[in-house]
Amino acid sequence: RWLLMCLYQPWRNLPYLVYGWVHSALFHLLKAGHFGAFLRGLGSAWLATPRTWKKRLERSRQPHNSNERICRLLREC
C-alpha cells in the first residue's frame, strides 16, 4: 500500500493517508498481533521508495488523457 500511495496519490490526500496508516498500525499491533510483520513489510516498501518516486516522476512527465478523451474511448468499445 505504501508504494501505491507514493505512486498514485495526490499530495492533498496526505492527511487521510496518514490517518489510515496509523489506524492500520494500531490494528496490527492491538488486534491482530502481527505488528512485526507490518513493520517488516513497511520497511521493505520504504527501501523501494526511491525507485517508486522515480516512476512517479516519469509518469508526471507523460501527457495526460482528458476526461473527454477517456469517455470517447469508452464509447468506442
Image (cartoon, rainbow, N blue to C red):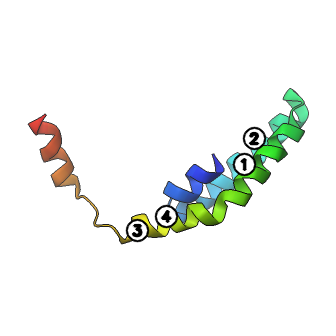
- Circle 1 residues within 10 Å: few <14, some 14–19, many ≥20: few
Please name the residue that numbered disc 3 is placed on.
Answer: 60
Q: Of label 1 and label 4, which has the lower sequence position? A: 1
Which comes before the other along the chain, label 4 or label 2?
Answer: 2
Q: Which structural element holds mark 2?
A: helix
Viewer-side residue, 19 vs 61: 61
Percent position (x, y) of residue 56? 49, 64
Q: CA distance from mark 3 to mark 1?
A: 25 Å
Q: Which one is in front, 59 or 24?
A: 59
Is residue 59 shown left or right of residue 35? left
- Work out whether mark 3 precedes mark 2 in sequence or the reverse, and give the earlier one: 2
Q: Is residue 63 left or right of residue 14?
A: left
Q: Nearer the viewer, residue 29 or 58?
A: 58
Q: Amino acid at mark 1?
A: Trp
Instruction: Kindly identify which numbered label has been placed on residue 59.
Output: none
Q: Which residue is mark 4?
A: 56
Tag 3–tag 4 contact (CB < 8 Å): yes
First-in-chain label (3 vs 1): 1
**Measured Cα–Cα span from mark 3 to mark 4:** 6 Å
Q: Determine the residue positioned at 28% across, 66% down.
A: 63
- Name the residue tied to disc 2: 24
Residue beneath label 1, please? 21
Furthest toward the top, the residue is: 32
| Residue at left offset 59%, top offset 63% | 51
Instruction: Measuring from the top left, give residue 13's x and y in whole percent.
Output: 56, 58
Q: Residues within 10 Å of mark 2 (few under 14, many from 20)?
A: some
- The residue positioned 84% from the left and 41% from the top of the image is 26
Quick check: 35 above or below 19? above
